[in-house]
Amino acid sequence: MALIEIKNFKKSFQGHDVHKDINLSIFSGECLGIIGGSGVGKSVLLKSLIGLIKPDDGQVLFKNQDITKLNEDELVEVRKKIAYVFQNGALFDSLSVYENLAYPLKEHTMMTEQDIYQKIYKTLDEFGVLNAINKYPAELSGGMQKRVGLARSIIMDPEVILYDEPTAGLDPYNTKIIQETIIKLKNKNVTSIFVTHDMPSAFAVCDRIAFLNQGVVAAVSDVKEITNNNDNEISAFAKGLRP
Ligand SMILES: Nc1ncnc2c1ncn2[C@@H]1O[C@H](COP(=O)(O)OP(=O)(O)O)[C@@H](O)[C@H]1O
Ligand SMILES: [Mg+2]
């Protein structure tokens, strides 16, 4: 059974039909890549999975619960289980790295200050950014900000992580670290959805890839099949043969 099911999802903005009829299942423990041209609605779709955007029609089922019907309090619970990694890291500029990571733990758990410290220390260490613990976001490089943003997203041990172009604008070193992190989390049975333009990273981390085009899921494919099949719509897109 699917962990997340998107059914007959429709969304338009100012008369522009972005999503006409999206149907997509995401299975527990997999990493599903979502690719497609700019403005095709990848970010809108991700945001709708945590109720930041409501569809005009259709359902988004998480463990059979339709999250499009939930109120803000219920969505807070969903967002503990489904983490969204924003494109820019979305750290609080006025808080140190430690305070940024401590924030969700203080807000949503009964953990002691000492347990919080240990958890943050361990997480930052895993992401190779322990030396940033007392720094402020503005003092960090773009790559480090992304890694800290990712560390904050997973600090609540989510079941699902939504990545919105996590490697965009990163150098090869930081790209590799992000890829390794996603694989590491996948090995812990975290389910991931990976929106990207970065095809090498998609091939490195995804089990399946869905290609969005003209408001629908134009193709879904096993990653292994894409590399074997030159006629595949997704590989054509990836190779720049389609807009
Ligand atoms: N909050 C919003 N208000 C109006 N239009 C929006 C909003 N969010 C997204 N859009 C429009 O929806 C389309 C898809 O956007 P988006 O999901 O950001 O695309 P992408 O696939 O590049 O992530 C774009 O045309 C964008 O302008
Ligand atoms: Mg986007």
Image (cartoon, helix red, strand yellow):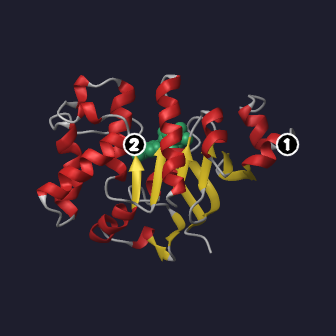
Say whether disc 2 or disc 1 marks the residue closer to the N-terminus.
2
Task: Assign a secondary structure to mark 1.
Answer: helix
Q: Position of residue 151 (x, y in %)?
A: 35, 45
Considering the image in quadrants, where does the C terminus appear? top right
Asked if residue 7 is positioned above or below residue 191 in the image, the reply reads below
**Which residue is disc 2 drawn over?**
86
Task: Assign a secondary structure to mark 2.
Answer: loop
Q: How many marks?
A: 2
The amino acid type, in three-letter code, at marker 1 is: Asn
Residue at 63%, 48% in the rendered image:
206
Q: Is label 2 or label 1 in front?
A: 1
The amino acid type, in three-letter code, at marker 2 is: Phe
**Which residue is disc 1 drawn over?**
228
Q: Hey, which quadrant is residue 51 in on the image?
A: bottom left
Q: Nearer the viewer, residue 80 or 220?
A: 80
Left or right: 33 in relation to 141: right
Q: Nearer the viewer, residue 181 or 36?
A: 181
Asked if residue 222 is positioned above or below residue 176 in the image, the reply reads below
Asked if residue 225 is positioned above or below residue 127 in the image, the reply reads below
Residue 175 in sight here: yes
Residue at 18%, 50% in the rendered image:
117
